[in-house]
Image (tube, helix red, strand yellow):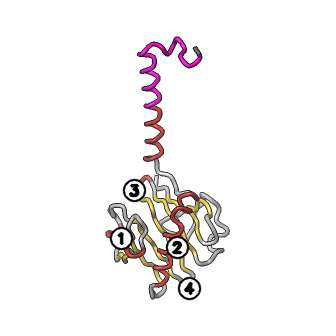
């Protein structure tokens, strides 16, 4: 009697309850997939080896101090890394991930990886800095300098890595 209450014996009631449950599931899944959100520590942990190999590849390039732009495929394979000459090439990358290298004279590099660019809905990614104290005084969700185009640090992942975003709304 407990598993089959009288109110659920009617087919239309079961159909309505199943429809409500299905609609709720679709709404929650849609919000999870389509609402832009900054990357988190779990995503960083999954991608840590790929991110570190990309950084090692960029740092191995003999470049003088300055600002440089690169892009890499969505799988973060170091073999796909290529230099981008201008900002026009940075847009419309069909899933590619963009990198900004800020190379200083003293050798302290800051590498910004934009893993998700949702246009006016925001940009999200990671910031790597050689200097472990580079953003030490940065307060989460307050604007920082030196990690453009990402302007806000979200959280620190380890000694050299931060999650970051730029909410353009």
Quadrant, the N terminus:
top right
Task: Name the residue nearer the viewer: 165 or 143.
Answer: 165
Q: Do the residues labelled 2 and 4 touch (CB within 8 Å)?
A: no
Q: Which residue is drawn at 49% across and 85% down?
A: 65
Secondary-structure class at tag 3? helix
Q: Residue at x 32, y 70 (%)?
A: 89
Q: Nearer the viewer, mark 3 or mark 2?
A: 2
Q: Do the residues labelled 3 and 2 touch (CB within 8 Å)?
A: no
Image coords of residue 86 (percent x, y): 34, 74
Q: Label 3, on which residue?
A: 119
Q: Do the residues labelled 1 and 3 touch (CB within 8 Å)?
A: no
What distance separates the C-alpha of mark 4 from that of mark 3?
A: 32 Å
Category of crowding for the residue at label 2, using alpha-carbon neighbours closer than 10 angstroms: few (below 14), some (14–19), many (at least 20): some
Sequence-first disc among 4 and 3: 4
Sequence-first disc among 3 and 2: 2
Give the left or right position of residue 139, taking residue 44 as reference.
right
Q: Label 4, on which residue?
A: 107
Image coords of residue 165 (percent x, y): 52, 60
Q: Nearer the viewer, mark 2 or mark 4?
A: 2
Secondary-structure class at tag 4? loop
Q: Label 1, on which residue?
A: 87
Q: Which residue is drawn at 34% across and 77% down?
A: 85
Q: Report how many numbered discs are placed on residues in the image.
A: 4
Secondary-structure class at tag 1? helix
Which region shows up in magenta? Answer: 2-23
Task: Name the residue nearer the viewer: 27 or 42.
Answer: 42
Sequence-first disc among 2 and 4: 2
Q: Label 2, on which residue?
A: 52
Sequence-first disc among 4 and 1: 1
Q: Which of marks 1 and 2 is in front?
A: 2
Q: Is the magenta stretch mostly helix, strand or loop?
A: helix
């Amino acid at each position: 009697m407990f598993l089959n209450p009288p109110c659920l014996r009617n087919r239309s009631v079961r159909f309505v309850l199943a429809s409500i449950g299905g609609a709720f599931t679709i709404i929650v899944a849609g919000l999870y997939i389509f609402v832009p959100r900054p990357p988190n520590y779990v995503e960083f942990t999954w991608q840590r080896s790929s991110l570190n190999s990309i950084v090692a590849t960029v740092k191995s390039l003999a470049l003088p101090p300055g600002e440089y732009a690169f892009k890499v495929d969505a799988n973060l394979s170091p073999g796909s890394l290529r230099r981008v000459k201008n900002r026009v090439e940075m847009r419309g990358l069909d899933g590619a991930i963009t990198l900004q290298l800020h190379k200083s004279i003293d050798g302290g590099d800051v590498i910004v990886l934009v893993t998700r660019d949702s246009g006016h809905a925001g940009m999200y990614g990671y910031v790597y800095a050689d200097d472990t104290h580079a953003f030490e005084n940065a307060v989460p969700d307050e604007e920082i300098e030196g990690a453009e185009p990402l302007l806000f640090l979200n959280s620190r992942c380890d000694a050299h890595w931060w999650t970051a975003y730029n909410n353009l709304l």
